[in-house]
Amino acid sequence: MNDEIRIAVLGVGKMGSFHVDSLTRRTRGARVTVVGDVSDEQAHRVADPIGARVVADPAEAIAADDVDAVVIATPGSAHEAQVLACLEAGKPVLCEKPLTTEAATAAAVYRRETELGRRLIQVGFMRRFDHEYAALQQMIAGGELGAPLMLHCTHRNPAVPEFFDSEYMIRDSVVHEADSARFLLGEEIAAVSVVRGRPTADAPPGVSDPMLVLFEADSGALVTVEIFVRTGIAYEVRTEVVAEHGSAMIGLDQNVVTKRRGGTWGGTITPDFVARFGQAYDDQVQRWVDAARAGIASGGDAVDGPGSWDGYAAAAICEAGVAAVVKGERIETGMEARSGAGGAMGGVA
Ligand code: ISE
């Protein structure tokens, strides 16, 4: 193996381009050699300045001789085939969420990786690499607050495209709260309910924005999620844990300079998720590259973060969440029993 592992990045929209930039400028031990995208023009825009090849066919990119590992940032519907191709090629893969779009297919991917006996799939739940989430997880796991009883999660985006309907809000946004809740509580989610409230006038007809989502964890601990994706303000993600002997909160945007100017004072709120979680995205990529290099050298596991089991769990929770939105009922996640490893970091992963 070369000193640097050679990476193919599939899908270079907002997230994929960010990962190419991170791999090229801020990550040690890796180099992007291949870029693929449905838009040839966009692929060249990203690949040409860094001297990477453009390969339009994802299967060809995954199999290429100048590719040791793969980052998948294509639309979710393409993930299943691409992740399975990485498994068959024996190449480590960092796959943006979702692992796949349905719980059944995500479970099948998890089982296939388990059969291979080698962990190659990392799922891009980047919040686990954010310093505040990591500190809160350690605080809870360390027991200083006593048993966690409730999590209150706030998830607000300033704006989203028109197609973001209530179901999409669960799959694309609440999915992060599903993974964060499992990570922070260290247990699985048993059931999901959704209350559709009064929508903002900015929501398209029939779309419930905001909504209140309730997760019930195996222990009975409760997780409330306010999901509101058209606030018109900024990107706000907060979590409070309420435990037996205390509470703690993250996401208060307090790590900023308070400015006084023009008769006002105050700080700024991060405009979007890349700004808010930039450190987490970069650390996630660096730790994945280090794990992939080690796994390629040893022929063993190549993951340092949430894995295929976590991808499956998130898919099962979101599937229940979507059913809860549609039927207006409490829906059990009905998760399969775990058979292999498929994850790392935090209690359940
Ligand atoms: C987006 O796709 C993300 O992954 C962000 O982290 C999330 O906050 C946002 O709501 C999603 O649309």
Image (spheres, rainbow, N blue to C red):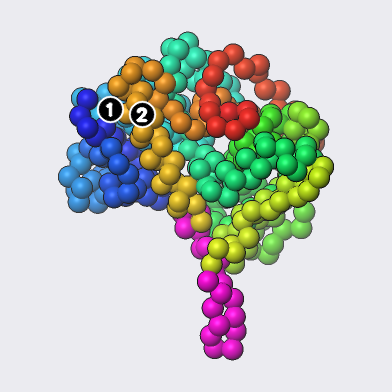
Which image quarter is the N terminus in? top left
Q: Residue at x 69, y 62 (%)?
A: 200
Q: Is residue 17 magenta?
A: no
Q: Position of residue 126 (x, y in %)?
A: 50, 42
Question: Label 1: which residue?
Answer: 68
Q: Which residue is mark 2?
A: 292
- What SS does tag 1 mark? loop
Q: Earlier in the sequence, mark 1 or mark 2?
A: 1
Q: Which residues are magenta?
A: 257-275
In the rendered structure, are the residues bearing label 1 and label 2 in contact, judged by CB atoms less than 8 Å apart? yes
In the image: residue 58, left or right of residue 204: left
What type is the residue that disc 2 sits on?
Answer: Ala
Separation (CA) of disc 1 from disc 2: 9 Å
Is ligand 1 closer than 8 angstroms to the Cβ of mark 2? no
What amino acid type should be assigned to the residue bearing mark 1?
Asp
Q: Who's the residue at 71% across and 51% down the image?
A: 248
In front: 245, or 15? 245
Residue pictured at 64% horizontal, 45% vertical: 136
Q: Nearer the viewer, residue 202 or 150?
A: 150
